[in-house]
Amino acid sequence: MKKRIVQICCVLAVIVIALLAAPGIDTSRITGMVSGSETQENVDDMTVFKTKSGNCYHVDGCSYLRRSSIETTYGEAKAEGLEPCSRCNPDRWINY
């Protein structure tokens, strides 16, 4: 029993280390990043991505886009009722 618990703990530790060591989002590929001086029209034109079946929008490089990646704009994503991804947090790139 103790041996099995140790094995499970080791597997969980490897998974946690792998997740922490995973490459982050490549922010150099994010298009349309805006600053506080940008207008709402420019924010709406920012490129984001959605999936075929999801209900969130993402930045390029988000791990949730591995199976499906459809380019759209921030304005279109919001108009469709999509929410920001909790993993890549695309709204952090918008300073308005």
Image (tube, grey):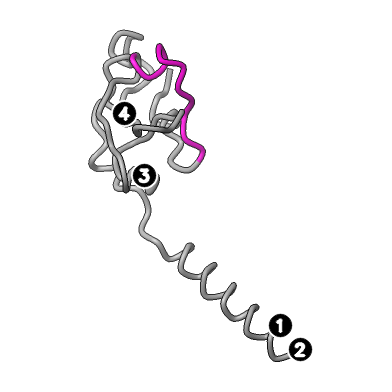
Who's the residue at 32% across and 14% down the image?
44
Which quarter of the image is occupied by the C terminus? top left
Q: Residues within 10 Å of mark 2 (few under 14, many from 20)?
A: few
Q: Secondary structure at mark 2?
A: loop
Residue 95 higher or lower than 7, as above or below: above
Boundaries of the magenta span: 76-86
Q: Tell which circle, 4 or 2, labels the residue nearer the N-terminal end.
A: 2
Q: Which residue is mark 1?
A: 5
Mark 4 to mark 2: distance in Å?
A: 49 Å
Q: Amino acid at mark 1?
A: Ile
Q: Which residue is mark 2?
A: 1
Residue lying farthest to the bottom in this orientation: 3
* Image location (x, y in percent) of residue 72: 27, 23
Q: Nearer the viewer, mark 4 or mark 2?
A: 2
The stretch drawn in magenta includes residue 18: no
Residue lying farthest to the right in this orientation: 1
